[in-house]
Image (cartoon, grey):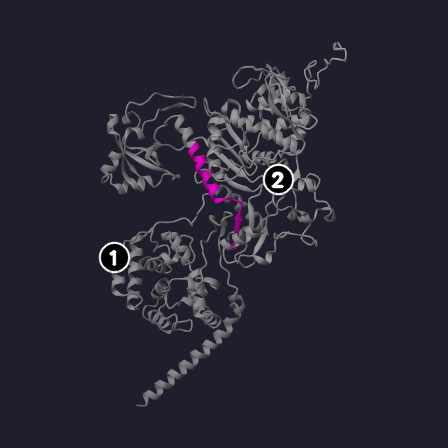
Amino acid sequence: MRTLPLLAAALATIGLCLAAGGFAGYYYLRPALPSVAEMREIPLQIPLRIYSRDGRLMQQIGEQRRTPVAYDDIPEVVVQAFLAAEDDRFFEHPGFDYQGILRAALKLAATGSRAQGGSTITQQLAREYFLTRDRTFIRKAKEIILAIQIENSFSKQEIMELYLNKTFLGQRSYGVAAAAQVYFGKELDELSVAEAATIAGLPAAPSRLNPVRNPDQASERRAYVLRRMNELDFIDNEQYEAALDTPMESFLHAPGVELDAPYLAEMVRSEMLRRYGNAAYTDGYQVITTLDSELQDAATRALRTALLQYDRRHGFRGPVAQVDLDALMAEGGATDTRLQETLNNLPRFEDLAAAIVLRAGASQDAGAEFFLRDTGRVQLPWERLRWKPYINDNVVGGDPANPAAMIKPGDVVYLLNTADGWQLAQIPEAQGAFVALDPGDGATIAMTGGFDYASNKYNRAVQAKRQPGSAFKPFVYSAALANGFTAASIINDAPIVVNNSGQEEAWRPQNHSNRFYGPTRLREGLVRSMNLVSLRVLREVGIANALEHIRAFGFPRLATPRDLSLALGSGNASPLQMAEGYSVLANGGYRVNNYFIERILDAEGNVLFAANPRRVCRPCADLWLDGLGPADNDELPEFARSADSDNATGDIPAVLDTSEISGVSSVEELMAIGESWRPDYIETPRFWSDREQARRALSQQNGYIVYDMMRDVIQRGTGRRARELGRTDIAGKTGTSNDRRDAWFSGFNGDLVGISWVGFDDDGRSLGAGEEGGRTALPIWKDFMAVALEGQPDASLEQPPGIVSVKISPETGKAARTGEPSVFEIFRDGNEPQAVFDEFEYLSEDIFVDDDSGESIF
């Protein structure tokens, strides 16, 4: 019996020694551990998120995919799944689990090997944030001490929230919300019990248990989690059986992008990296761009449609690859699964899917059979296949006799998903770009830089410097109007020979039609895009004078040649530069600079940056000396005085009160607040007394006359296809460079500028016969504007003061005589032709008057 007191004494001694050792270890290790204050400031790496101006997600960028979520917003089934998988006594223990530690100690004593185990959720959190993953007793001791500190500093709910937002779950996803999106493409509250159990099983081994790459092992782990959930009464038997029988179906999903705008998103990423360095990817910045989501979608669709149509006109180039179906059969059969695996390695494109030809009929009635990626086997009739073969960029072959004359089994081709069903298609080799700006302040409204960003990230809207051809002529004609010409000036459209000492042969430019039209009014020269008229105009104005005028539109010096070819658009410009230049014509003559970031917010929603571009204030033109800058406040009319004036009126603040938007909880809330202060630059001149105004680049009268001539380009000139829009406020100009290497259409009304370009990345390759601005590029602009202008009121430029309309002879450009053919033309007041009076013809009184004698005076 004396052994019991001795045993008790021994155990007490051991306990005291352990306690003493524990306290000693605690005080020894504690200084090296973070303080409570540091734990309270635990950072989360949150990716950069980029939004359109109406709040649609364009891109999410960062090494760690994470979407922080509050504890109250985490579904109970998700919390329960993690408790079952990792720590079912989480809400009971003080941060470490005696039972788990005892199990690990017993295994060490029994086997002599260290065991992974005994780590509670709190300990895992401590390790994730502050410790290494070294498997040592010192690290384990630190982990326990730190877990105790965390438990004393945070509530259980706060600890669980941190853990479920922090823990790594594979595929660069951190936290349960990111994992739900990555593996299942769902929000947290959309997860099923089986899906929640799958995610909860990942922390033990995120790579080995990845449900996409290792579905069998992931299924085994899920079964364990589900069994524990059932044992803990988190789910009943029926739920357990149903979840257990659910197939393991998981695919990788990109972040929930809501708007396809990768080209501008990349511009934002580059700018954020310049501003904030690598912290741009981890500190949770939110960027609101100037893009309009509806119009961005319209631009993307319009460009892709036009490129596919161009490609179809130039013939079928054949399959992109060949699969040996006989070899597949020999290896175990060309099953749908094997066919799908073969196609998975091919690039994916919007509305285009790779397919393998399984059968090609020898008659038209037989059609063809394909295996289509993600769809399976499909049959296509002859009318969905028929396509002349490509010979070269200028020539297509004859009609094929049947499907077998075009394709054969094993060919890999692409099919296009149209409204009428699948159709044989191919990836266009030609490229294109489209950009739309708000001419009032230069904001980018829509931008797409190519057919497919994933396959080629080159942003042609910004980076491609190409010859604009005749699309550049409006700037030359504007220079002519500023140097003595009028829209009625007569220029001889006749042959020109330009001798250049640097070339062996003289330059003999031609009109597109290879014809000469003789004396031609300036307006007709622009409407019909007559090259020889443009050359003579430039020669008369003088290259130096023209260049000085054109610089005001924002074109860099190196982009504009110093010779007569300038008149034909032989310089280099990007679609974005052309859009900035055309904005001057669209807004009444003001120079605006492009911008694409509206606001930058931090992770808490505080505004770090708000754009303040130079904007056009049209009413200010009369108030402030034609837009050259605001006058002193006292000189303004009462309604136009600044906000601190006693006589100020209106309810739009002169400056943004950022206190209103600090701490907003969502992008949508920010959008609503932002709209409440963003001024209408046409209706609110008071706002502009304290704002930066756009500077005038050319007179209102000059800009209006060019606009009026360009309206005729659409109504009866090379841009006639745009008349299908049924608008009278639109103006534009086609452009085609030498050998049809570039096709352009540039157009606008008072509210919107749009520029479309089509060409090959190899700028020496021609688009082919018949591919000109009006046919190749104009449809992009027209399809975009059909969406942008639907339901919108007329936005014609208002005729400014100082413009007069005069009847002229279309042959001479002079004031029309009575009875001769005439047209109306507009002029700057003082530049109009003077009326010519024939003898006696315009006298107001009869000079043949009888006197009292009844005889004639004459």
In this view of the protein, can residue 90 be seen by the observer? yes
Under circle 2, the secondary element is loop
Q: Residue at x 32, y 70 (%)?
A: 110
Judged left or right of residue 782, residue 562 is right
Q: Residue 187: x and y, percent?
A: 39, 55
The image shows residue 123, relative to residue 271, as above or below, that is below
Label 1 amino acid?
Answer: Asp
Q: Residues within 10 Å of mark 1 (few under 14, many from 20)?
A: few
Queried whether the magenta region covers residue 844, the answer comes back as: no
Query: Hey, which quadrant is residue 382 in on the image?
Result: top left
Q: Residue 687: x and y, percent?
A: 64, 48
Query: Hey, which quadrant is residue 443 in on the image?
Result: top right
Q: Residue 503: x and y, percent?
A: 61, 17
Magenta span covers which residues? Answer: 283-306
Which mark is on residue 245? Answer: 1
The image shows residue 578, relative to residue 232, as above or below, that is above
Label 2 vs label 1, nearer the camera = 2
